[in-house]
Amino acid sequence: MRDGVNGLEGVVAAETVLSEVDGEAGRLVIRGHGLEALAGWTFEEVTGLLWSGFFDGLPRDLRPALGAARAEVFDEVARLDDGLLARAPVEAVRALTARLADGDDLAIALRLAAAPAVFTAAAVRARQGEPAVAPDPAAGHAADILRMSRGRPARPAEVAALEAYLVTVSDHGLNASTFAARVVASTRAGLTSAVLAGLSALKGPLHGGAPGPVIEMLDGVGAPQNARAWLEAALDRGDRLMGFGHRVYRVRDPRADALKRAVAALGKASNVLPGRFALAEAVEVAALEVLRERKPNRSLQTNVELYTALLLEALAFPPEAFTCVFAMGRVAGWIAHAREQVLGGRLIRPQSRYIGPRARAAA
Ligand code: ACO
């Protein structure tokens, strides 16, 4: 396969007003706001920003509507049976989401935005043998996610950390899951189908499935002084170092710093984190050093997933649910991109280059 064809690198496959990823400068802009300017925003606010102009009747304040949508999709939690619980949480969330009606209107979009939050919380609790906790429609989305997951309200510092995470990952150009969502939306299949495509693409370990394995890496390293030897052994086995490298960024992913700040802020209000934070920093320094030595021609830097893993662990999400928490934020972007594709785009139908045998001439 020719370089660049297989992974579509450098190919512009959509025009978007939603976000810009500048891989050389390490900059992310979401609808005219640099990522750093979105610090302190809520998930509802960034969703309103992303969805603006794409839905009739979009309310200025999405909080009550999203709260009501959480309550609506909670009915589907009853379908979370033992068969689904035996699967990974992302598969349970995908199966429950597939039960929601398809369509393109705001009510469906709100239910889809609520779905990963409500279904993940229920799946996590059910795996712990605990009953699902019904949503509180009056609560903020991030606060309610933590309350539904734990069965008790979270501290304000924890809510702020989850809010920062959801906002940080809400949209990111034409990443693999967003592209998948746009392809499906381009056929006019509907928002539920587009979100399911996005979720399916997100779950892979080269995309949103990376932060769970980051925890395995940190546990494997164990102590800062072991970092270099452990990482070298992993690369000797042919493994990739999770949380490093990116298709677009040639410098540090700006989301890594936003999340590192969120973890540090949470650390001040927590007794659990300090040792873990130091370990992650030591792993980061050693990994960048080893990757520089092993791949001198390729700029492999820290991506969003290293500090995602630390943040979600500190918020007591189990690693097997990390991808679902990623989906809770990214679903806002998938829906905005799907609507943008439907309203302004055409059917996405590229061509392949045939490299198989030529047809035999008829005898
Ligand atoms: N560890 C070790 N080597 C790496 C890593 C890594 N994390 N990332 C890339 N490389 C190496 C590859 O082995 C390859 O080496 P080679 O040229 O000697 O064969 C070279 O760098 C280029 O790799 P590609 O696969 O072409 O790079 P691509 O742009 O396709 O990869 C990706 C991007 C998939 C993110 C990759 O860096 C990776 O696998 N990282 C680890 C998984 C991860 O953290 N994923 C989350 C990404 S962020 C997100 O999706 C939200």
Image: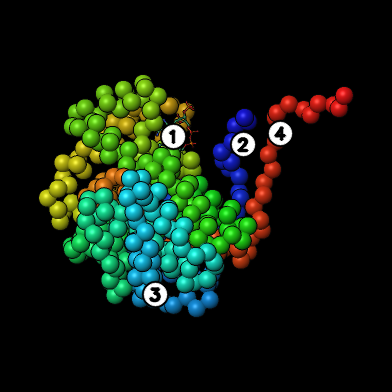
Q: Which residue is mark 1?
A: 299
Q: Which callout, 1 or 4, points at the residue further toward the start of the chain?
A: 1
- Residue drawn at the location 49% of the way across and 43% of the way down: 248
- Please state which of the two labelled residues, at mark 2 or mark 1, is closer to the viewer: 2
Q: x, y percentage for residue 35?
A: 39, 57
Distance, label 3 to label 1, CA atoms, is 44 Å
Image position of 265 with respect to 243: above or below: below
Q: Amino acid at mark 3?
A: Ala
Q: Which residue is mark 4?
A: 354
- Please state which of the two labelled residues, at mark 3 or mark 1, is closer to the viewer: 3
Q: Is residue 125 left or right of residue 329?
A: left
- Please state which of the two labelled residues, at mark 3 or mark 2, is closer to the viewer: 3
Distance, label 2 to label 1, CA atoms, is 20 Å
Query: Which residue is at the front of the view, 267 or 22?
Result: 267
Q: Which residue is mark 2?
A: 5
Number of the label disc, if any, that sits on residue 65: 3
Query: Which residue is at the front of the view, 79 or 272?
Result: 79
Distance, label 3 to label 2, CA atoms, is 43 Å
Q: Amino acid at mark 1?
A: Ser
Q: Which callout, 4 or 3, points at the residue further toward the start of the chain?
A: 3
Distance, label 4 to label 3, CA atoms, is 49 Å
Q: Identify the secondary structure beneath mark 3.
A: helix
Q: Which callout, 3 or 2, points at the residue further toward the start of the chain?
A: 2
User: How is this picture coloured?
Assistant: rainbow
Q: Quadrant of the C terminus?
A: top right
Q: Which callout, 2 or 1, points at the residue further toward the start of the chain?
A: 2
Q: x, y percentage for residue 296?
A: 43, 26
Q: Identify the secondary structure beneath mark 4.
A: loop
Q: x, y percentage for residue 310?
A: 26, 46
Query: Which residue is at the front of the view, 268 or 123?
Result: 123
